[in-house]
Amino acid sequence: MKQLVEYIARALVDNPDKVEVNEIVGEKLLMYEIKVGDGDLGKIIGKEGRTAKAIRSIVAAAAMKQGKRAQVEILEPEKH
């Protein structure tokens, strides 16, 4: 499932090498944190959050097949 989230995120951004996906597995919950490089945050979120909502829907549907719930968080790039 983590590979699915990484694949989708990398396909959307300009700097796929800077995409990081952290998976946190609970008993009934799967949590995915997506970090992207500078300038790519807007591409992951999309207009009015549509892209982010679509990613969350796909991940939720895949998790439901495993009998779990999924949550996707999109984290802002760290400022240096």
Image (tube, rainbow, N blue to C red):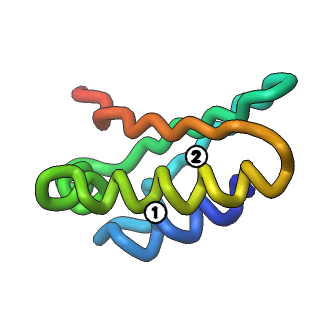
Position of residue 33 relative to residue 17, above or below, is above
Q: Nearer the viewer, residue 24 or 35?
A: 24
Point 13% across, 52% down: residue: 48
Quick check: 70 left or right of 53? Answer: right
- Badge 1: residue crowd in 10 Å (few <14, some 14–19, many ≥20): many
Q: Earlier in the sequence, mark 1 or mark 2?
A: 1
Residue occupied by mark 2: 21
Name the amino acid type tagged 1. Ala
Residue occupied by mark 1: 9
The quadrant holding residue 12 is bottom left
Point 48% across, 51% down: residue: 56
Q: Split into 4 quadrants, where in the image is the C terminus?
A: top left
x%, y% of residue 62? 70, 59
Mark 1–mark 2 contact, CB under 8 Å?
A: yes
At mark 2, the secondary structure is strand
x%, y% of residue 24? 71, 29
- Badge 2: residue crowd in 10 Å (few <14, some 14–19, many ≥20): many
Name the amino acid type tagged 2. Val
Residue situated furthest bottom in the rendering: 11
Quick check: 14 left or right of 73? Answer: left
Q: Nearer the viewer, residue 29 or 24?
A: 29
The quadrant holding residue 3 is bottom right
